[in-house]
Amino acid sequence: MRPAGRGPLESLYFTYPHFDAPGPDHDRTRPMQVAIIGAGPVGMVAALELARHGQASLLIDAKDTFNDGSRAICVARASYHILDRLGAVQPFLDKSLPWTTGRSFYRGQQILEFEMPDSADEKFRPMYNLQQQYIEAFLWQAVAREPLIETRWQTELHGIEITGPGATLTLRDPHGDYTLHARYVLAADGARSAVRRLLNLRLTGENYEGRYVIADVRMDHDHPTIRRALFDPACRPGGTVLIHRQPDDIWRIDYQLRDGEDPRDATREDRVRASVAGVLAEIGHRGGWELEWWSIYSANTLALDDYRHGPVIFAGDSAHIVPIFGVRGLNNGLADAQNIGWKLALVLSGRAGAGLLASYTPERRGATLDVFANASKSARFMTPPTPGWALMRDAALSLALRHDWAGALANPRQMAPYSYAQSPISADGAPSLRGPSVGTMLPDKALTKGFLSDRMGPLFTLIWFGKAPTVAHPLLTVIDQPAEGPLARAWAAPEGSAWLIRPDLHVAARWSGACASDILSFLDTILERQA
Amino acid sequence: MTADIEPLYDLLARHIDAAGPQMTPLFLAKVALALGHALNDTPRALAIVTACAKNLEG
Ligand SMILES: Cc1cc2nc3c(=O)[nH]c(=O)nc-3n(C[C@H](O)[C@H](O)[C@H](O)COP(=O)(O)OP(=O)(O)OC[C@H]3O[C@@H](n4cnc5c(N)ncnc54)[C@H](O)[C@@H]3O)c2cc1C
């Protein structure tokens, strides 16, 4: 929502572009290998990942511009690696605000300062703040220059029918309705997914009680990019307030409604202004401020039981809704898009069997369930559901005023990317190795020139310690590292040990004393799986 | 060898009275967490808590 007198897209700092629909003579009905429904951040990353591996796609969106409001603002390190591999990260680095520190306050007094893991070995910082409009705009720059992606704005999906191998879509644009056949459909059409509804699929899980308002304001406020959490502040007794800095002097104020506070009342402009003024007074902001945009949300943990329905594959908010304060909604969506992107590209080009796609749901739904587990802990802390949880939360906060160990209970657990250790395409040939475990994301390392992540090939990469034997496979890049070098030391990697890294930088397998045939036969087992 | 529990008994009673009925739960919850932290033995702390939940009826 925006203040009275301003239209839904009249932002204080962002100019929304307008995208035309395809012209009346456009060849609309040509069958497609992949149709992506929704050009939000997830749909765009999926299209870019497919294109990176040579696969064309059609990307459609009902709207004529980007999503309104600033929505998701915290982009995690793992997402920057995704953007980096797409060759799209530079504008994000130029605009976003990196941060590593969070501070929690209880009744005005600081009880905890946490640092997210970071070091000179990491190419990217643990977190960056950037408004979602910019995220979409920068992704769109990359999509627009990619000849393998055809985008149709103002094109809405109205029907879907699963027909033989593939699906027939009914699409509507300003020139009328038409049908189009696609071999695979990626449903990246967001929380109110039309694809999900048309296929009669349901999200299952929990809705939490607490309601939160997010308001973005523009102000000249001198404070570093640090996430501030205020527990039980004077401006909202018993409630929780979060404050984040964004580029362009925009600040996100996120506050919890009181029990019994009517959501409709609480989102009236005058009430939002009063609540924001209270928070700003509490953090000592004396200058002026302008209200940019606000919205209300509740915390939900909802997901599809299976992210795949025949030729239709769900990614992003269409597949899962997670509580905002875990900052995983967008980040997990981007990881979904990358995951399905490389797999689908390999399958469609005949470089892998369709069985590879069976690993998508366990890997990405697993990541969502992991978020749920952490989110319910955070939700219980931020919005205690019963008097028992409330009492223990207050006890922990009160202890944290003097004891660091209690402050740790207030630490938001939101950072680590999920491990694919249990995935059907992971295998640990050497569990006794101390270096990165199978399933985890490749830890980065500063090398003499650039970073380890820069050395990864387009698809699979084998990191071999010592002199690598010849391992020839069309999808494999082999790099060797000196057995006594800095990476070998960091990973405690003995000579002859080897790590296989996936296209999404997760560890697929590791061996000690491996030979070429072990590696080739492992690649064959994951790539040659039939549906 | 059992610790001399009487000083703890006395001190808790005094602080409960000082805290007043409204703040007593918060005070006792803090005490429980802090003692549990100092005990540094989670299974034992959990067993003690479970045991304390028994015989609460009047
Ligand atoms: C008000 C609000 C505030 C949020 N705040 C935060 C936050 O603070 N932090 C955070 O991490 N996340 C936040 N989120 C969530 C975050 O925005 C989403 O996780 C993210 O946008 C998901 O991206 P997506 O591409 O899956 O879906 P979306 O961004 O929703 O994109 C879906 C796209 O599909 C298109 N579409 C839908 N139906 C059709 C159809 N039938 N035909 C064609 N196109 C269609 C839509 O036009 C849209 O462009 C917020 C979301 C909302 C709505």
Image: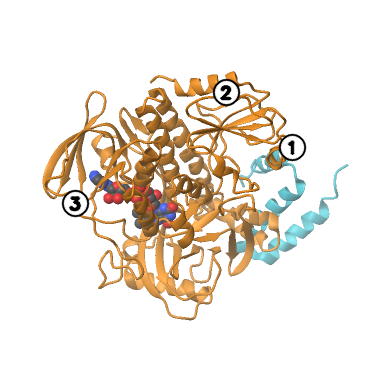
Q: Position of residue A511 (x, y in %)?
A: 64, 26
Q: Nearer the viewer, mark 1 or mark 3?
A: 1
The reply to whether residue A136 is visible in this rendering is yes
> Residue A253 or A378: which is nearer the viewer?
A253
Q: Chain of mark 2?
A: A
Labels 2 & 1 near each other (Cβ < 8 A): no
Labels 1 & 3 near each other (Cβ < 8 A): no
Q: Position of residue A389 (x, y in %)?
A: 55, 51
Q: Secondary structure at mark 1?
A: loop
> Residue A284 or A402: which is nearer the viewer?
A284
Q: Secondary structure at mark 2?
A: helix
Q: Which residue in the structure is indicated by mark 3?
A: A21
Chain A visual colour: orange
Point 40% across, 28% down: residue: A357
Task: Tell me the amino acid under the disc marked 1.
Answer: Glu
Chain B visual colour: cyan
Q: Which residue in the structure is indicated by mark 2?
A: A519
Q: What is the number of callouts on the image?
A: 3
Labelled disc at residue A484: 1
Q: Distance from label 3 to label 2 (Cα)?
A: 48 Å
Q: Position of residue A492 (x, y in %)?
A: 72, 36
